[in-house]
Image: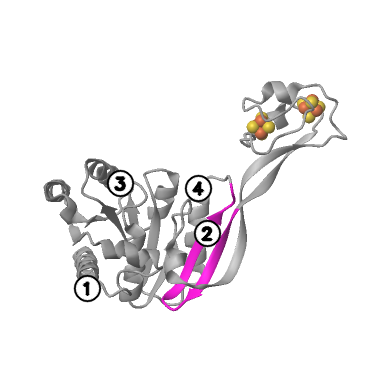
């Protein structure tokens, strides 16, 4: 199975729209939404939860009042102010560092795993789809992204492609998104910050040795910037797979929970289809060169 991850320097560039559109055009694939901070692919894929699992990642400290002698050493040790004056731990402030466990002379403190989210594997008309939801107040983590990918892989049944909507940015969740991918497609917009974000994402992919490609969304809003992006991509040997036109009907389609493909937006659909053909051909070409 070839794993293609769609990434961007920040949210809102259109990578989920691209991934969801391809879910209608690519045969024999699995899908995953690794943008665990702001998942939205499920809205467009309209699947039914086939399987849900709790996800535990953070650990928080807990004091056993029966053993506590109120010596105060834990409160003095905690640098996060998580131990209050009654020597109780506020789990929302606890960073799980474990320093208080070592400081307590009575062995009254222990660490406990806490649920930070849920992972799902859905059955959809477009293929098996793995995704996650963070619990309220929790932060996106590379561990949760990895859990989503593992759950997708565990249900693989001879599919040829995995289309993965990755996390935006260049942090831990993004690194987990692109780990093991056969290609990263960076979706950007033609703005100064879009260009800067794209370069950071391409640097991240290059650092981890993931073949990178670019896709310029709303390219016609700033032709000068689009040319600059193409020039910089050329200089880095990064193929620009697609220029997607700005079309206010794309937003209207998304507001109606439809991809531009379902909404019959032909210019967008044709460009996405051509983009996929270029990507598949390029991956084939690179694979045969390695043989
Ligand atoms: S260090 Fe241990 S014994 Fe002392 S106040 Fe904290 S929990 Fe209680
Ligand atoms: S685990 Fe760390 S952050 Fe949490 S209460 Fe103990 S010292 Fe404070």
User: Residue shown at 37%/77% (left/top)?
Assistant: 28
Where are the magenta residues, as a range? 117-136
> Foreground residue, 261 or 168?
261
Please tell me whether the stretch drawn in magenta is mainly helix, strand or loop.
strand
Spatial distance from mark 3 to mark 2, Cα to Cα?
Answer: 23 Å
Element carrying mark 3: helix
Dot 1 crowding, Cα within 10 Å, few <14, some 14–19, many 20+: few
Circle 4 residues within 10 Å: few <14, some 14–19, many ≥20: many
Of the four image quadrants, the one with ligand 1 is top right
Q: Nearer the viewer, mark 2 or mark 1?
A: 1
As drawn, the label of residue 266 is 1
The picture quadrant where one finds residue 93 is top right
Q: What colouring does the structure picture have?
A: one colour
Distance between mark 4 and mark 3 Cα atoms: 18 Å
Residue under label 4: 140
What residue is drawn where x is 66% and y is 48%?
114
The numbered mark, 4 or 1, whose residue comes first in the sequence reads: 4
Decide: is 93 above or below 284: above
Q: Which mark is residue 50?
A: none
- Where does label 2 land, which residue? 132
Q: Residue at x 28, y 65 (%)?
A: 249
Q: Earlier in the sequence, mark 4 or mark 3?
A: 4
Earlier residue among tags 2 and 1: 2
Work out whether 151 lies above or below 231: below
Q: Residue 201 — which label?
A: 3
The answer to whether one can see residue 168 in this image is yes
Give the mark toward the camera: 3 or 2.
Answer: 2
Classify residue 45 by image quadrant. bottom left
Classify 192 as above or below 279.
above
**Between marks 1 and 3, how big is the CA–CA gap?**
29 Å
Of labels 1 and 3, the one closer to you = 1
Residue 268 is one of the magenta-drawn residues: no
């Amino acid at each position: 199975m070839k794993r293609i991850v769609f990434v961007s320097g920040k949210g809102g560039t259109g990578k989920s729209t691209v991934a969801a559109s391809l879910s209608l055009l690519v045969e024999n694939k699995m899908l995953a939404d690794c943008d665990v901070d702001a998942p939205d692919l499920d809205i467009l894929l309209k699947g039914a939860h086939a399987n849900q699992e709790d996800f535990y990642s953070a650990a928080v400290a807990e004091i056993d009042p029966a053993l506590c002698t109120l010596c105060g050493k834990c409160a003095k040790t905690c640098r996060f102010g998580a131990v209050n004056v009654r020597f109780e731990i506020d789990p929302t402030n606890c960073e799980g560092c474990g320093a208080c466990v070592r400081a307590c002379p009575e062995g009254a403190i222990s660490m406990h795993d806490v649920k930070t989210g849920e992972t799902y594997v859905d059955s959809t008309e477009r293929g098996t789809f793995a995704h996650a939801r963070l619990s309220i107040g929790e932060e996106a983590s590379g561990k949760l992204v990895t859990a989503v990918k593992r759950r997708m892989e565990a249900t693989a049944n001879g599919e040829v492609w995995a289309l993965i909507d990755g996390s935006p940015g260049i942090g831990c969740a993004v690194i987990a998104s692109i780990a093991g991918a056969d290609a990263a497609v960076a979706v950007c917009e033609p703005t100064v910050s879009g260009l800067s974000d794209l370069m950071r994402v391409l640097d991240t992919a290059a650092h981890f040795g993931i073949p990178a490609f670019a896709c310029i969304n709303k390219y016609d809003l700033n032709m000068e910037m689009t040319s600059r992006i193409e020039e910089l991509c050329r200089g880095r040997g990064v193929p620009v797979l697609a220029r997607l036109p700005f079309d206010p009907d794309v937003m209207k389609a998304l507001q109606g929970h439809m991809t531009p493909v379902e909404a019959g937006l032909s210019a967008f659909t044709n460009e996405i289809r051509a983009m996929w053909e270029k990507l598949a051909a390029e991956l084939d070409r690179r694979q045969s060169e390695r043989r």
